[in-house]
Amino acid sequence: MNPPMPTSASILKDTFGYDTFRPNQREVIDNVLARKDTLAVMPTGGGKSLCYQIPALLFPGLTVVVSPLIALMKDQVEQLRAAGVPALFLNSSLSPQAYQENMADIASGAVRLLYVAPETLLTPRLYALLDGLTVDLLTIDEAHCISEWGHDFRPEYRQLVEVRRRYPKAVCLALTATATPRVRSDIKSSLGFSGSNEFVASFNRENLYIEVSEKRDPLKQTLRFLERFKDQSGIIYCFSRRQVDELAAHLAGRGFSARPYHAGLEDDERRRNQEAFIHEDVQIMVATIAFGMGINKPNVRFILHYDLPKSIEGYYQEIGRAGRDGLPAHCLLLYSYSDVAKQRYFIDQKEGTERLAAIQHLDAMVKYAEDELTCRRKPLLAYFGETYTQLKCQNCDNCNAEPPQLSDITVPAQKFLSCVVRTGQRFGAAYVTEVLRGSQGERVLANQHNQLSTYGIGADLSAKQWQSISRQLVTMGYLTQEGEYRTLSLTPLAQDALKKRTRIMGQMPEVEAHPRSQQVRQSGPDYNPALFALLRQKRKELADQAGVPPYVIFSDKTLVEMAAFYPQSPEGMLKVSGVGQVKLRQYGETFQTVIREYCQAHNLSEAFPAASHRETRGTRQTRAEKSDAGRRYIFIGEAYNAGESIANLMKHYGIAQGTIVDHLARYMMAGNSLRFGSDLPALAAISPAQQAQAFAIFDEIGANLLKPAFERLGEQISYEELKVLRLLYLLDHSL
């Protein structure tokens, strides 16, 4: 009996290890298989690669993938070959012999996917090779590079239409993660697309916590931020090469695992640093935007922008390098107006259309950074033509900040608006502030604005307070900012408010603003951190032996599911996202052994929910996640027994000490034993007499409920201390 013909769904599961398609994947794949030219816009981490990799395994001929960077090609080919897919690349990183060998393999028809740069593809040598083959699919990755209005325009991409003309029978798929409606139109026009062939997925990355913070002491702010991500991978973006070198050296001197990356480094050093980061020998990469599109590391847990990005498209692309595995990640942007001045200096060196586009990009970026009231996702998604309908995302600084205390700011607002009018609506907020505060600056005096009635009437407020008021007036629609100098002008709403003396409510900022909430929303299943650490260690060993990045073996998301559900059989392993038949054969037994040994030591068994934990993937909370919440005490108890401290568990789960102690008590009351950790007695500042009194009450009434004990003790011991005493009591009586 012949085996069934493969389908896109069977390849998705058997080759790549996934049960379900992500949004728009199936539609794009079906459109390509119907041989219709297709533009697909999908967010970073949204599964663009599968949109051409699956058709490549269903088409009889060759799929050519145009990719802009060597690192990206290498990464994709490594992952495909690990999954058993015959793929090769041709670029300058190959030796002459290896290049010739790859050419021969391609000519033989043994290769299904060929990755090339546009410059390589447009050469007579490649044309001669491809002319002897059937090219079924031409895929153009990072297709925004075609458009002059994209954030990373590359002239050689414009010439790809020549390839289309040379191989007219090949269906064309253009892919990008960042494209405004204008850029999308330009891509289709340049490639000769026609008809309905555009698929645009949501740009919303729910797992990313997005935060913008005023840049005050950037080094101190960076160090404080990094303390929250020990042993985690992340990228810090800086504006200049010098800044990259200085910050990387400073972090290394402070004991952080950090290296620099920019175009000024020698090629070998740049390559070594990138490889070290990808292979997890280095945790932090400090880089300019030169560290860009070729990075496909799925477990980047944070992105820190030390300086303001040039555009929202670039910013979105850069934060999109975090959390590609779907697990939580944090994106912090440090912003000051001095960053804007630096960007404008370089914009002034451009001419014509390029300069105009750069000004528009920067204006949008500044407006986004200065908005302290709106959910971060609303303007970010609106830039790409998408409407975010939720009131709050609960996963950004603006949504998580304490509700603003509104007060009557009518008088300072009127002063500011009047000053804008009296200075001729020709200046930005910084200049208007100077006039209001009575500056003796050369420009103010030269313009004779020291003679205005509004000169000096705002000396009672600081420059930062006036800047905050100006931003609020823009956000509320009383002012507009236009042009490269962000010139302020009044709207009809403001003119009406001045005439009628309308009351204006807003925030009167303190001289030093209170810190904003930075609590990152947790997502995904609860898992055992001790087992996860063991699985990561084993993955690193295998990756080093094979000479590939760890994520080529398994992603962090896959290891998280292993540490959550303890699969100890081939059938159990295949239930885990990212485990297909090839990887099961290659690595299944090795990881099963680690899990079995851990489970035997801690008396555990497979813990998959009755229904598949992936049935409802994509919903707010999956069935598995609900099940996991009820089992968290087990994970915490096991992790503590494995040597984790209470402090580390608090950090890992993002919960308070009392909650950890509650979980440990519950773990014991479920009949499990718990080690007596040295950190337990120090948790409660209780005298021996009080402890003895509490133990006597627990002997009498039991330790299940704390309220009766609290009352019997005359409410003299807090609930937090009582929780610790209960745990100590349970430990004492288990010996």
Image (tube, helix red, strand yellow):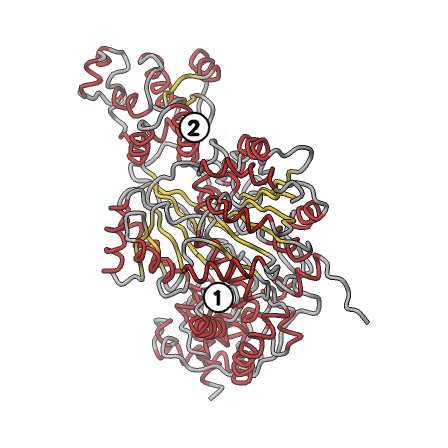
Q: Is residue 395 visible?
A: no
Mark 1 residue crowding within 10 angstroms, few (<14) / some (14–19) / many (20+): some
> Where does residue 452 sit, x and y in percent of width and height?
26, 11
Picture quadrant of residue 388:
top right
The amino acid sitting under disc 2 is: Ala
- Check disc 1 and report its element: helix, strand or loop: helix
Q: Position of residue 128 (x, y in %)?
A: 55, 48
Quarter that holds the N terminus = bottom right
* Res. 551 in view: yes
The residue labelled by disc 1 is 659
Where disc 2 sits, the SS reads helix
Disc ID at residue 261: none
Give whichever of 472, 216 is nearer the camera. 216
Q: Nearer the viewer, residue 669 or 241?
A: 241
Q: Which residue is mark 2?
A: 357
Q: Which mark's residue is nearer the viewer, 1 or 2?
A: 2
- The residue at 50%/64% (across/down) is 552
Q: Position of residue 642 (x, y in %)?
A: 45, 79
Residue at position x 50%, y 70% from top?
Answer: 662
Q: How many marks?
A: 2
Q: Is residue 262 above or below residue 451?
A: below
- On screen, residue 341 versus residue 502, left or right, reads left
| Mark earlier in primary sequence (1, 2) | 2
Q: Position of residue 571 (x, y in %)?
A: 67, 75
Q: Amino acid at mark 1?
A: Thr
